[in-house]
Amino acid sequence: MMIDKMAMVDTNCIGENTLIKSFAVINKEVIIGSNVIIHPHVTIEAGVVIGNNVEIFPGAYIGKPPKGAGAVARKIEYEQKVKIGDNCVIGPNAIIYSDVIIGCNTLIGDNASIREQVIIGDFCIVSRSVTINYNTSIGNRTKIMDMTHITGNCQIGDDVFISVLVATTNDRAIGQSGYAEEKVIGPNIGNGVAIGASANILPGVSIGEGSVVAASAVVSKDVLPRKMVAGNPARVIKSLDGGGEI
């Protein structure tokens, strides 16, 4: 391994052929695999485990403790741990909070933000400036494109494609009734769903497996499997199981 003399490294759990560049800050109780590259100005907090062949670009912050500053209505709960799987890439200035698990071969794009209690599967893309809020699960091979917001308490399946500028929300009271766990519920997006650019998926909505949401659609009700919906509010315009247009 090679550690630049200007890096601050407080862990000895570092694998072979790992490179840590200048001004990186790596705290105690961090485990780093083999063939890892950590670029300048990366900060890694205690409790982080980094797999083999991972590359972390400048300015990324891994294991950031979530803080509410007294302004957040919900109680913030988390464990001081992060796991990043083998062959991942973490882009410049990405922020990964504590209590996050990222599978293998996953790309986290520049300026992405991933909050606590999030699980992301294998072979995923979380693209540039995507925000993923708390207590959210994302399946394998799912792609979330630039500037999309994934709300808290959201479930996203395998093989999902979510285009740019998509908004998901979890509170039909729009913050006017405080935080109640049983009422603040994000969308449930099934396996193989595709969501077009600038779509808006409202709280508690379920989108069935294999469905397509057209660009700019506002989805306010559940979508059955293998349907295409469009418009505001979104309506079924086509069946994708051979039934033709509606």
Image (cartoon, helix red, strand yellow):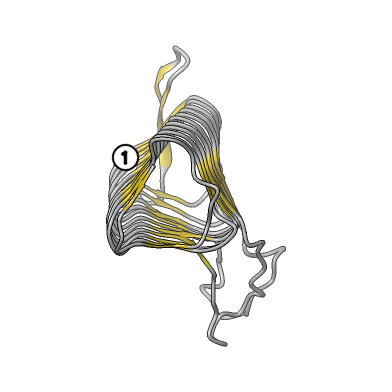
Circle 1 SS class: loop
Q: Position of residue 158 (x, y in %)?
A: 52, 30
- Give the residue at x 67% y 75%: 75
- Give the residue at x 31% y 43%: 145
Q: Nearer the viewer, residue 139 or 198?
A: 139
Looking at the rendered image, the quarter that the C terminus falls into is top left
Q: Is residue 4 visible?
A: yes
Q: Nearer the viewer, residue 204 or 82?
A: 82
Residue 209 horizontal side relative to residue 123, left or right: right
To which residue does mark 1 refer?
A: 196
Residue 135 horizontal side relative to residue 7, left or right: right
Looking at the rendered image, the quarter that the N terminus falls into is top left
Q: Position of residue 229 (x, y in %)?
A: 40, 36
- Badge 1: few (under 14), some or many (20 or more) residues near its Cα, within 10 Å? some
- Taking the view exactly as shown, the residue that stands out farthest to the bottom is 70
- Give the residue at x 40% y 39%: 54
Q: Position of residue 77 (x, y in %)?
A: 67, 68
